[in-house]
Image (spheres, rainbow, N blue to C red):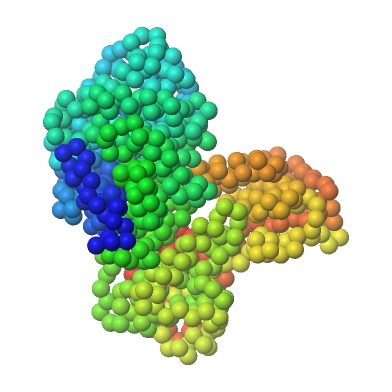
Amino acid sequence: MGVRFPHLFSPLRIGQVTVRNRILCSGHDTVLIRDGEVTEELIAYHEARAKGGVGLIVLQVSGVHESARYTTHVLMATDDECVPGYARLAQAVHRNGAKVFGQLFHPGREILESKDGSAPVAWAPSATPSERFHVMPRAMTEAEIREVLDGYGHAARRLRQAGLDGVEIVASHGYLPAQFLNPEVNTRNDGWGGDRQGRIRFLRAALRSAREEAGDGFVVGLRISGDELSHDGLSSELVLQSVTELDAEGLVDYISVCAGSSSSLSGAQHIAPPMFQPAGYTAPLAAKVRAVVGVPVMVAGRINQPQEAEQIVAGGQADMCAMTRALICDPDLPAKAADDRAEEIRACIGCNQACIGHFQLGYPISCIQRPETGRERRFGVLPTITRRKKVLVVGGGPAGLKAAAVAAARGHEVELHEAGRRVGGQVLLAQLLPGRAEFGGAVTNLEGEARRAGARILVGSRMDGPALAAAAPDAVVLATGARPRHPRLELIDDPVVLDAWSVIRGGEVPRGRIVVADWRGDWIGLGVALQLASQRRKVTLCVTGFAAGEHLQQYVRAAMLAQAARARIEILPNVRLYGADSDTVYLQHTLTEEPVLLEGVAGTVLAQGHDPVNEFDPVGLGVPADRVFAAGDCVTPRTVEEAVLEGLTVATQL
């Protein structure tokens, strides 16, 4: 078992706890909690990953004090009423062979929201503002520091009482303990600041508080950014000095290393690094920590495949690998890798849309490739069929592939017809843009899922009404996608106007200044602008919203905007396309409705959204109307996330 990955599937001793393998699901927000407490949805979510073979689950952050409520949907461990919920969760994880730790947390100045929408009073070592959330905190009093430190101990005691195996103090990503450590943030002159020993005092006291109240044999670890990678962040050197001291004092049973800081847009990208970061890029930071401490070291940072984790562990850079988003995408990843079925793993593509993207919008966690995630109680077990039906799926984009996969897995006879030479729909375009090749993995994963389930996939097979009726199916799923939208424009003197799809596919673009007119504010307009800039074109990106990439997850958007800035792409916000002539593009300001003219333009690229493609009349298909279903962009154009979710939903109704 696990012979291809012998290091990854060897047990690991952490304090008094033995973990069955080196795969970690690190702490991450799920929005599957209610009123600060564990829910049945959260239990089902983690139970699925324990069943899938993960070694260790670290729960999302648990607030240690009322001032730690950094969102309206944070877990809290501030009173004994939380214990039964944590206990049910621990039991569910344990009965499936995994271990479970909690995270003890205080955000300090990194506050996102409050209960009622009014600005909260954030506590921090000093009144040093946060750049990202624009929060001006208040310096903590001595009494408040003592309250919070006591909270770490009380929370640790409660989690041990609930049956968890350990806890970790969250000093990563610029949260409160890291703020005390950081001379750029902590400007105190009392015993909690002034010099390095004063600044480390809070973290040392938090670890001691947790240890003393939880008692002997309970694991107490530390999560810390190996480098905060931010203009005002902790440096790698300061982190190494700190962990060396804490380890020498016997205060930590393990150290979990990540990167980045919540305090700046550039640093925050590393909280959930998008696909633009290489796999395992934080492993060197973990290796530096492992070289100076004697306890196990864990690492997080875009480790998506078992071979990547095996290499990190075998190479001595870390003892355990967080594969969190990989487990969100495929909770059975460990079992598949152990059973020599690694090729069946549904690989995470680092899009961030439905995992951390959902959290930042206040929605429960999911995955664009696997909408069952976060919906385990609804879709965890597929409904059984009473009669095997012949199901015909028209369209091989994400919606059609998911519908085919799930219908076949349920036992139906499934045939998918795709008019093009390849399945994949718009994903095949997305993967062609700079830095987004990994997005194509969504097609590989969905197609593999469908074929393994037994669906028959036919490419170059265009279906019309008569052909569909002749096939005599019992049910039809229409997943025929969308086409580029061409809005009505005032065009004079035959200007060059192209759509984004043709440009992405390598169509000819004239020399000179190119205007990309972006209505949606997603990956298309910004991606095409980057593609053209990489070809040394002068590009002006005109967007109808307040910012380019407005509808992208913020870490993805920040990374792409950084690329756009380096490429000297001009971005013009709050304008709508009106028309064009041979060398001028006519726009209108969306707020003032005043005209905006861009002169010296060689061509305009339209990223104006899509029109649905649904040319079938259900009446003539020879199938009862209630047996004809539609999914994805042919319903109305949206994203891969909605397409795959609708494919799943439709397939469970067949």
Residue at figure coordinates x 60%, y 65% from the top left: 611
Relative to 95, 326 lies left or right: right
Above or below, comparing residue 109 to residue 473 in the picture = above
x, y percent for residue 654: 35, 75
Quarter of image, res 297: top left
Which is more toward the observer, 469 or 174? 174
Residue at figure coordinates x 44%, y 70% from the top left: 447
x, y percent for residue 540: 72, 46
Relative to 345, 499 lies left or right: right
x, y percent for residue 253: 23, 34
Above or below, comparing residue 328 to residue 568 in the picture = below
Q: Is residue 71 visible?
A: no
Which is more toward the observer, 410 or 255? 255
Residue at figure coordinates x 24%, y 52% from the top left: 10
Which is more toward the observer, 629 or 392? 392
Residue at figure coordinates x 24%, y 62% from the top left: 1
